[in-house]
Image (spheres, helix red, strand yellow):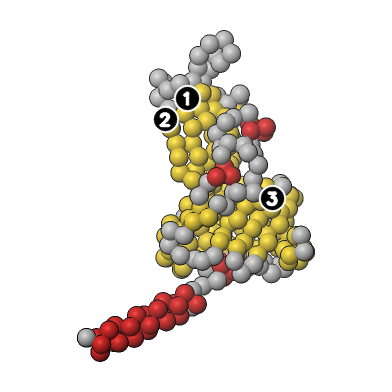
Amino acid sequence: MRAFLYLFTVCLFFASCREEKEFLQMDSIEDFYPLQVGKSITYRLDSTIFARSGTVIEVHKYQVKHTVIQETEDNGQKAYLVQRLINNENATGPWVNNGTYLVIPSSRKVETLDNNLRVVNLQAPLRQDFSWKGNSQLPFAPYQQLFEMSTGYDMNTWDFYYASFGNEDIQGQHYENVWTVEQRDESLNIPPTPQTSIGFKERSVEKYAKGIGLVYKDFQLYEYQGAGGSDNPEAHYIGFGITMWMIHHN
């Protein structure tokens, strides 16, 4: 019996060592958001807007180039300044400045700061179903003033989590070692029917490929209000949507 207990203890010890070794050999989150001055990724971007007081759905198509232009600091921590340039769908026009944002990397997380909205896009450890509050630093209802809608009011409580890892084909391109970060997938009465009085959609997901960075993003935040009463003579949408995927990178 003592010999059995001894062997059992030894097995547990080596099993724990193997588990620790496997954890130590896991990829770093920095592998999935590589940063250096001059690094550039170009995306195809489909922007969904609701024109004519929200009664018409339009999808505007662009190319957007994200380029790391400078190493800087954020509250004393190393950060990188990224410039966005925008062009038409086929990039046949001039590249026009579309603003900048910060990326703040560390061994434990990668944050972005864009239009004063700070998000933790990646968080260690890289493990299936690991979750974190990626929007916890956002204010309550961050888009309410822009769109006068209640959809997304609780964004700062959203649970981000690693939904899957593996090889993927996205818009005709093959990627190795892709983490999918699910952020939100809630909807009601979308698409609406003629009888729908109210509906909404909150959809947010990102995909990161090892050695490249962000290769896909889908962010939909809008609500639908059916026609009714003098204050709302026509059914309409409020909000916006963005879908983007990588075209090429250096």
Where residue 15 appears, x then y in whole percent? 36, 80
Examine the rendered structure and indicate whether residue 92 appears above or below residue 202. below
Q: Which residue is at a point 50% across and 39% down the rendered structure image?
A: 202
Label 3 packing within 10 angstroms: few (<14), some (14-19), many (20+): some
Q: Residue furthest bottom?
A: 3
Q: In which quarter of the image is residue 230?
A: top right
Q: How far apart are marks 1 and 2 (CA)?
A: 7 Å
Where residue 109 appears, x then y in whole percent? 60, 63
Q: Distance between the residues labelled 1 and 3?
A: 31 Å
Examine the rendered structure and indicate whether residue 70 appears above or below residue 97. below
Would you name the residue on which mark 1 appears?
198
Task: Tell me: 211 left or right of 9.
Answer: right
Amino acid type indicated by mark 1: Ile
Amino acid type indicated by mark 3: Asp
Q: Are marks 1 and 2 in contact (CB under 8 Å)?
A: yes
Q: Do the residues labelled 1 and 3 touch (CB within 8 Å)?
A: no
Label 1 packing within 10 angstroms: few (<14), some (14-19), many (20+): some
Would residue 169 be visible to someone looking at this image?
A: no
Q: Which of marks 2 and 3 is nearer the N terminus?
A: 3
Q: Which residue is at a point 59% across and 49% down the rendered structure image?
A: 135
Q: Residue furthest front?
A: 2
Where residue 61 appears, x then y in whole percent? 58, 44
Q: Which residue is at a point 48% across and 52% down the rendered structure image?
A: 182
Would you name the residue on which mark 3 appears?
114
